[in-house]
Image (cartoon, rainbow, N blue to C red):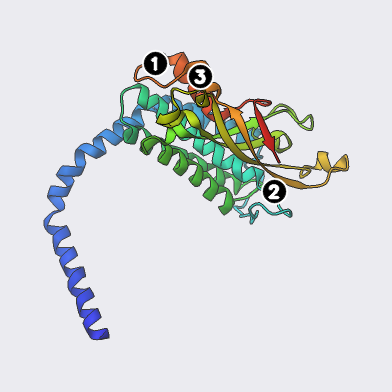
Amino acid sequence: MRLHLNFGLSVSLLCIAISSWAGQARAQDILAPARSEFVEDVYALRWETGLLIGGVVSTGMRRWNWGSSATFHTSKEGWFGMNTGSGGADKLGHAMSSYAITNILSEQLLREGRSAEQAALPSMLIADVVMTGIEFFDGYSVEYGWSNEDLLMGWLGSGLAYWRQTTPGVREKLDFRLEYQPSGYKQFTPLGDYAGQKYVVALKLSGFKDLQDSPWRFLELQTGYYTRGFSREEQAKGMERSRQGFVGIGINLSEVLFGQRESAESTARRAGRLFFEHIQLPSTAARVE
């Protein structure tokens, strides 16, 4: 039996090799236009990518102490446990960052007439490169270090954005958002003040055809997660660590303000939709924790 399997495997590998060799030139001819289009799409995002990288490098040098360690090191941070640095809020922050980068870059390409696939793929890859670069330079920070957990959550966020953009009907139904109220423990910094953050997944009823002409289209179902008491400032005031999940019903502000998405919309209208797809305004939902 083992001989038969090995022989069959060898024949299969030989056939694959011959097929690959014989069709290499033809494959190159077929893939050349796709590669050319991909390069053009990446090049079309050069200014946005440059500004993004500039902002990340500036933040890394000022706030994340890049270069403070002479040697590269890693950090095992954990996931959502009580004994982690923020109960997982920082992990969701990495997912949100790459998710938002992918969507913002995709929106630019969509505005220029690309298909959803053409817009999402280069945007996702740029987000992944940026998030990987952040982890690499974190490896040279005394305070942080390369974190596999952070990297995986970043890739998960960009993957979610890609799936949401390229699967018909998902963008109209599903949002991943950040809700932020300054905690008072730190300066206004939405992505670093975990004591003021909540992460929200919203199922928008306006995305279902049967509800698009009913009052239900202005509502959405929500679930989410946040943590409190993990920062030194909170603990100094006697606050205990806690991890909170919630469910609720919210107002779909994008639907209230802009209505159903149209094929041709103004830049301001598209920017408004993009904002409410990523930002949850406080006090716009009734929740049970």
Does label 3 or label 1 sit earlier along the sequence? 1
Give the answer, above or below, for where 23 lies relative to 256: below
Does label 2 or label 3 sit earlier along the sequence? 2
Secondary element under disc 1, as helix, strand or loop, is loop
Q: Is residue 272 left or right of residue 13?
A: right
Q: Which mark is residue 280?
A: none
Q: Amino acid at mark 1?
A: Glu
Does label 2 or label 1 sit earlier along the sequence? 2
State the residue position of label 2: 87
The residue sitting at 55% across, 31% down in the picture is 220
Q: Are marks 2 and 1 in contact (CB under 8 Å)?
A: no
The residue sitting at 15% across, 43% down in the picture is 29
Q: Quadrant of residue 81?
A: bottom right
Figure disc tally: 3
Image location of residue 119, percent across then percent down: 36, 32
Q: Is residue 219 left or right of residue 36?
A: right
Image location of residue 267, percent across then percent down: 43, 15
State the residue position of label 3: 272
The residue closer to the viewer here, 127 or 103, is: 103
Image location of residue 126, percent across then percent down: 43, 37
Alpha carbons under labels 3 and 1: distance apart = 11 Å
State the residue position of label 1: 265
Give the answer, above or below, for where 129 lies relative to 83: above
Q: Are marks 3 and 1 in contact (CB under 8 Å)?
A: no
Q: Quadrant of residue 59?
A: top right
Q: Is residue 245 left or right of residue 57?
A: right
The residue sitting at 46% across, 42% down in the picture is 160
Image quarter of the C terminus: top right
